[in-house]
Image (tube, rainbow, N blue to C red):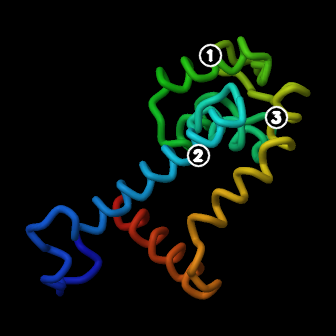
Amino acid sequence: MFASSTIDISIMSNKIEKVILFQIEQTSKASKIYSQREFDRLGVDITVEQWIILKIIDEHPEISQKELAEKSLRDPASITRTLDLLQKKGLIDRMAIPGNRRQYQLILTNAGKKLIVTYLPIVEEHRKRSTAGLSKKEINKLSELLLKMQENMR
């Protein structure tokens, strides 16, 4: 069940604020709140969740809706609602997959590509702000540790 039979008692604190998974969740929420506030301030008409979906589609051309749900760790119904909104905004298209009437390939429209290009520098600034004060070595180690934790829960 656990990767190690030895458990450090310090990670089993009774205080929720000391629990690593709670800290990760709080960090994620703070990041989304900050980013959404900045999107709203700039008049970007999408949510952080919609941005994430657009960015995944941008990085994985012709990804299927099913693959998108898996990659984003979201349920298919939630993905469908988000994609409906993004399609209404003219940011994505759904293309039929030949021989498969149940799945669609997702592609960014020109407007979707333009949105990514326009706002990626702002998102990159948000990312830099989130890691301000951390060395490159610390950032790499943090990423390594988070990926290890994710693997532990698969």
Name the mark on residue 102: 1
Name the mark on residue 128: none
Q: Quadrant of the N terminus?
A: bottom left
Left or right position of 143 against 154: right
What x and y, as percent, mark residue 111? 87, 26
Q: Amino acid at mark 1?
A: Arg
| Mark 3 or 2, nearer chain start | 2
Q: Quadrant of the C terminus?
A: bottom left
**Residue under numbered circle 3:** 115
What secondary structure is found at the residue carrying circle 1? strand
What x and y, as percent, mark residue 133? 57, 80
User: For the point 65% across and 36% down, which residue is it?
Assistant: 41
What secondary structure is found at the residue carrying circle 2? helix
In the image shown, does 66 or 93 lie closer to the viewer?
A: 93
Q: Amino acid at mark 2?
A: Ser
Left or right position of 6 against 60: left
| Mark 1 or 2, nearer chain start | 2
